[in-house]
């Protein structure tokens, strides 16, 4: 093989590599799974479940705790299409309605996100030993930033990390995803939220600051 042939082969390989570069993706429209939230730069953490409905732009996050023989339940219903979310305390039957910043919606890679890199979680030595994943990053309002990891196949979300000067670092890890939602009432506010009035705030919460607040309150309940 002469020098020109080698250059041609290398050029073809380079073109193929560029053509196969990861691109922003969208997760399955209906999903349910588990999540762990760590907020306050590691000061507090909570674990619960998450349900997602892309058609209605809705997310439901539930956190449960047990103190002695008394159980507590705090969850959030995020309605991105209405730019509001409900924070629900089932032990007190209380409901707070708050403004929601919709500039970052989970379960998809934003179109303006930049690719940080692609790695195998685990091993690529044999089929089934690892998961090919892509890490993306971008900006949030108020001088914030985020990074997020999605699987290359299926566009399944794995982790989100955000930083804002006001709230510090927040990390959201998701796991045990299944495609679909089993409860059609999952995204309906409970009856005692009907009289809740929208709280006045200078800036609306992002999904990161909302989940950080949920983790903080779950920690207090414990």
Image (spheres, grey):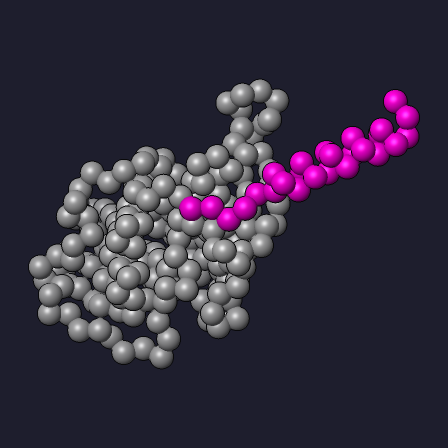
* Residue that extends furthest to the left in the rendered view of this protein: 191
Q: Residue at x 19, y 58 (%)?
A: 89
Up-down: is 199 above or below 71?
A: below
Q: Judge from the rendering whether residue 200 lies leftward or rightward of residue 70; answer left or right.
A: right
In percent of width and height, residue 107 lies at 40, 48
The reply, left or right, for residue 8 in relation to residue 16 is: right
Chain part drawn in magenta: 1-26
Q: Position of residue 22 (x, y in %)?
A: 57, 43
* Residue 105 in the image: above or below residue 35: below
Q: Nearer the viewer, residue 222 or 42?
A: 42
Overall secondary structure of the magenta section: helix
Q: Is residue 125 left or right of residue 97?
A: right
Residue drawn at point x = 53 percent, y = 24 percent: 129
Direction top: furthest residue: 126
Residue 14 placed where, x, y %?
73, 38
In the image, taking residue 199 as reference, residue 116 lies left or right, namely right
- What residue is drawn where x is 35% and y is 50%? 46
Can the viewer see residue 138 in this picture? yes
Task: Say above or below: 203 vs 104.
Answer: below
């Amino acid at each position: 093989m002469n020098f020109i042939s080698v250059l041609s082969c290398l050029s073809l390989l380079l073109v193929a590599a560029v053509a196969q570069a990861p691109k922003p993706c969208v997760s399955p429209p209906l999903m349910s799974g588990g999540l762990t939230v760590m907020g306050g730069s590691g000061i507090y953490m909570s674990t619960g479940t998450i349900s997602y409905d892309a058609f209605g732009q809705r997310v439901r996050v539930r956190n449960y705790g047990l103190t002695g023989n008394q159980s507590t339940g705090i969850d959030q219903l995020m309605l991105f299409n209405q730019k509001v979310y409900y924070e629900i305390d089932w032990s007190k039957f209380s409901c707070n309605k708050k403004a929601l910043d919709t500039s970052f919606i989970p379960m998809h890679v934003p179109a303006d996100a930049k690719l940080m890199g692609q790695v195998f979680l685990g091993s690529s030595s044999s089929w089934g030993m690892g998961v090919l994943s892509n890490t993306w990053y971008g900006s949030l309002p108020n001088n914030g930033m985020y990074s997020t990891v999605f699987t290359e196949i299926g566009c399944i979300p794995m982790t989100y990390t955000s930083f804002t000067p006001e709230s510090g670092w927040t990390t959201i890890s998701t796991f045990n995803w299944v495609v679909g939602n089993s409860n059609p009432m999952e995204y309906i506010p409970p009856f005692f939220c009907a009289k809740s009035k929208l709280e006045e705030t200078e800036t609306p919460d992002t999904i990161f600051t909302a989940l950080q607040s949920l983790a903080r309150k779950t920690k207090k309940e414990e």
